[in-house]
Image (spheres, grey):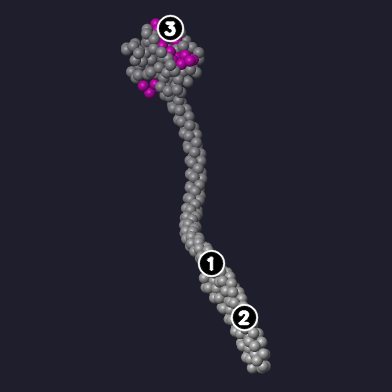
Amino acid sequence: MSGIVNDSMNKGSIMDSEDRIERTVDIYISAEEVKRLTSYLSSSGSDGVTIRSSRAAVVCLVLLCVLLLTAVIVLCVTFTQERQQILTKITNLTEERDQLLTNNMNLTEGREQLLTNNMNLTKERNQLLTNNMNLTKERNQLLTNNMNLTKERNQLLTNNMNLTKERNQLLTNNMNLTKERDLLKSEKNELQTLYFISSETKKWAESRKYCTNKGADLIIINDKEEQDFVKNISGDAKVWIGLTDQSVEGRWKWVDGFSQFWENGQTNKIEEDCALNYSPGWADFPCGNKYKWICEKSIFK
């Protein structure tokens, strides 16, 4: 830009110099014509003519001087104006050049800043792309893990369902086997044991004595099946069984010496030391009361 401004200033200066040279040449040409005219007048004519010619020459010289002075003044004024215009143009062009240089510097700084920003944004973009790639890989890995865990969970659920079915089947089989065992045990007990239920009533001690005289004893209830059996044969009647706490108050024992505690919330009342069986379950009653009884005897004894 500064080169263009300097070229423009140089071209303007050359053109102004050529104009001044042309004007100077014109002035010199006019002076030569006046000299030729004066010489011609001096050489031709008489003395009178010579005097008139001298006067005319003086007049011409005066006129020529006036013209020269006028031309010089005009040239000075013109040169001064042109010089002032050139200086003004130079000043304006210098200011314009400085402004363009400033703008160019600002644009250069702006471009460098944009290049720096672009470089930083490019780095940030590349970092984001790398992060996105890593996150995508991690997501895919998590999806794969989730799929594997889902399959494993489904397999575990299937295994659990199968194990639950198998457990339920085993529980059912165990229940059936338990029922079958209890039935066989009950049948075995019934086959191995003889039972006698009285039709008359006696005190607890008298009832036991009756049983022992027959080689038996008051019944000992060993399990639920035997309890149900006693209920079936006694009905709603109250019957003495071989359970008492006469030896130590509150410590209930069967007639064979084994301990037995109360069930179903039964309480142990003082002076009610003998147990009987009736439809709700066992109960303690005074041993002097009279009730029916059940004797029990093993056929292998």
- 163 to 107, vertically: above or below: above
Label 3: how many Cα within 10 Å (few below 14, some 14–19, many 20+): some
- Using the image, tell me which numbered label, if any, was put on residue 91: 1
Residue drawn at (50%, 61%), measured in percent from left and top?
106
Q: Is residue 295 above or below residue 132?
A: above
Between the C-alphas of marks 3 and 1, the distance is: 149 Å
| Residue 207 visible in rendering | no
- Assign the C terminus to one quadrant of the image: top left
Q: Could you tell me which residue is drawn at 60 percent across and 84 percent down?
A: 28
Which of the pair 257/30 is nearer the observer?
30
Badge 1 density bin: few <14, some 14–19, many ≥20, Cα 10 Å: few
114 to 149, vertically: above or below: below
Answer with mark 1 or mark 2, whichever residue precedes in sequence: 2
Residue 287 lies in the magenta stretch: yes
Which residue type does callout 1 highlight?
A: Thr
Work out how far the residue at label 2 is from the one at label 3, CA to CA, in angstroms: 190 Å
Residue range of the region highlighted in magenta in the rendering: 276-301
* Image location of residue 56, percent across then percent down: 65, 85
Dot 2: within a 10 Å radius of its alpha carbon, few (fewer than 14), some, or many (20 or more) residues?
A: few
Q: Earlier in the sequence, mark 3 or mark 1?
A: 1
Of 224 and 38, nearer the camera is 38
Q: Mark 1, mark 2: which one is toward the viewer?
A: 2
Q: Is residue 206 magenta?
A: no
* Residue 99 point in image, percent of width and height: 53, 63
Secondary-structure class at tag 2: helix
First reached walking from the N terminus: tag 2 or tag 3: 2
Res 55 visible: yes
Write down the residue under mark 2: 62
Asked whether the residues under the numbered discs 3 and 1 touch, taking CB atoms below 8 Å apart as contact, a structural biologist would say: no
Q: Residue beneath label 3, please?
A: 290
- Secondary structure, mark 3, is loop
